[in-house]
């Protein structure tokens, strides 16, 4: 690591630590979405409302925010491991790779999405339903691998439906 990269890494860790501390004091804070890994639900430029949550209260399908090296990541929980540290298999809906995150790195759970001036509450029944379907597709695409042509076609169709709904926002 060059001195410049090390300096950037330290700045990012400091920012993450400060944000995490503030979040735990406030219990809920808005965080900007900086990548397309959770498309079609979350787009770059959206903001997500992150509420504090203990690892014991995270459920299959929750969208979580966690620390990963020098960044914060927003991904979906597709499996829960009930080991000593309570760890989770997480992945972006638009990603093919899933990774394990340990409970101590969890910052919070996403409860709402803001796009422009409109806000989607993920606790509203219609969005809970879509969230469950997105979770199933995300989990299936990881578990059954992308070679499953039928699953890929179903996922594409459902993603188109979600995109149409989100355009109405």
Image (cartoon, grey):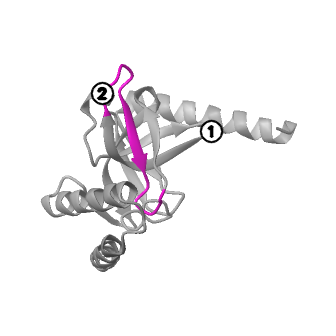
Q: Position of residue 106 (x, y in %)?
A: 42, 34
Q: Which numbered tag is attached to residue 82?
A: 2
Q: Earlier in the sequence, mark 1 or mark 2?
A: 1
Q: Which portion, as a residue range, is magenta?
A: 81-96
Which residue position is annotated with label 1? Answer: 70
Circle 2: element type: loop
**Residue ID at (28%, 36%):** 58
Q: Residue 29 vs residue 158: left or right?
A: right
Q: Looking at the image, can residue 54 be seen? A: no
| 153 or 27, nearer to the observer | 153
81 relative to 78, above or below? above
Q: Residues within 10 Å of mark 2 (few under 14, many from 20)?
A: few
Q: Residue 133 vs residue 37: left or right?
A: left
The N terminus lies in quadrant: top right
**Residue ID at (36%, 54%):** 143
169 relative to 32, above or below? below
**Residue ID at (30%, 62%):** 137
Q: Position of residue 128 (x, y in %)?
A: 19, 57
Circle 1: element type: loop
Res. 38 image quadrant: bottom left
Q: Which numbered tag is attached to residue 111?
A: none
The C terminus lies in quadrant: bottom left
In the current view of this chain or complex, which residue is farthest to the left?
A: 125
| 47 or 147, nearer to the observer | 147
Q: Residues within 10 Å of mark 1 (few under 14, many from 20)?
A: some
Res. 52 image quadrant: top left
């Amino acid at each position: 690591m060059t001195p410049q990269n090390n300096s950037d890494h330290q700045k990012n860790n400091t920012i993450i630590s400060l944000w995490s501390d503030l979040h735990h004091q406030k219990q809920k804070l808005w965080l900007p979405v900086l990548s397309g890994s959770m498309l079609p639900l979350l787009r770059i430029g959206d903001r997500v409302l992150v509420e504090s949550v203990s690892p014991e209260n995270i459920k299959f399908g929750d969208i979580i925010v966690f620390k990963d090296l020098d960044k914060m990541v927003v991904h979906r929980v597709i499996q829960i491991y009930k080991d000593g540290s309570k760890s989770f298999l997480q992945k972006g809906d638009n990603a093919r790779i899933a990774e394990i995150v340990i409970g101590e790195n969890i910052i919070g759970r996403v409860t709402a999405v803001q796009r422009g001036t409109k806000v989607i509450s993920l606790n509203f029944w219609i969005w809970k339903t879509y969230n469950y379907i997105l979770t199933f597709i995300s989990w299936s695409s990881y578990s059954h691998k992308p070679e499953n042509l039928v699953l890929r076609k179903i996922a594409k169709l459902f993603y188109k439906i979600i995109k149409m709904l989100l355009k109405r926002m």
